[in-house]
Image: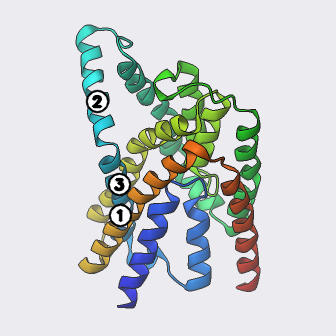
Amino acid sequence: MLDVLRALLMGFIQGVTEFWPISSTGHLILVEKGLGANEAQFGLAFDAVIHLGTLLAILAFFWRDILSLLAALVGSIARRNPVYSPQAQLAWLLLLATVPAVLMGILFEKPIEDSLRSPLVVAGMLAGFAPVLLAAERWGSQERGLTRTRLWDAIAMGAAQALALVPGVSRSGITISTGMFRGITREGAARFTFLLSIPIVAGAGGKKALDVLTGTEAGSEMKVLAVGFLAAAFFGYLAIRYLLRFLANHRLNVFAYYRIALAVAIVIVYVATR
């Protein structure tokens, strides 16, 4: 029963913090240090299914957008015109913006994970990037919606997503902020961010699943995997829905202040448990 409750907790944390600009790594460190819950204790299989749960959340929420973008992409190829419609242009921009994170992940994911996943580094990134959210609110013009995304917007947001390989940065936080700096509305930048994350989340979950299939590690109980998967999917869906509604009328400031508070909490817990 305790493992099921821990699986529910880890699925909840993964589902919410994967999409909110508050860093999933920071919260996982707090849970690991403070409560003794750790996805590693469930094995690679559990880590894979909670990532796939968040992927399901994105696909379930944006399925209409995804079908529309795929249709526009096919249409643009048939017409040999990548910008024949706003949707076609957006589809190609999303593909382009995916490249930096894919390259960074292939080249540097393991070294970054091994050398930078420490509580103090994560706390530093949480606090250090909090002012970026505040600055985006202060100086971002926020004049354009999602379908008015431009080439350099996509390049900038794709490069920003690549920076999120560093634990504590937050993929959604840095990418949404970059979009706002480029003049995209909060909600538009968030939608671009979530659509942009689909290949990355799918790749992360798929890689972990492949590691499970090719490894010798004992798997978790099926009920633990099921609880983790469903929790990540359910709470991830709710997190996306709430954040998009929130950003339509509210600033990112509350997340910036929360990041600073979380950084302080991580340092306190780190010192107390040494």
Give the answer, above or below, for where 132 lies relative to 188: below
Residue 175 placed where, x, y %?
58, 40
User: Mark 3 or 1 closer to N-term?
Assistant: 3
Q: Nearer the viewer, residue 269 or 9?
A: 9
Q: Give the residue displayed 75% in from the left and 59% down from the top.
A: 124
Task: Give the position of the C terminus as an image quadrant.
Answer: bottom right
Rounded to the nearest angstrom, the CA distance separating label 3 from label 1 is 7 Å
Residue at the top extreme of this rendering = 80
Q: Give the residue displayed 66% in from the left and 66% down from the top.
A: 118
Residue 90 visible in rendering: yes
Give the answer, above or below, for where 31 lies relative to 25: below
Q: Which mark is residue 234?
A: 1
Q: Would you name the residue on which mark 2 appears? A: 68
Residue 121 visible in rendering: no
Q: Which mark is residue 57?
A: 3
Crowding near the residue tagged with mark 3, few <14, some 14–19, many ≥20 C-alpha atoms within 10 Å: many
SS at mark 1 in the image: helix
Residue 54 placed where, x, y %?
38, 57
- Identity of the amino acid at label 2? Ser
Residue 145 placed where, x, y %?
52, 28
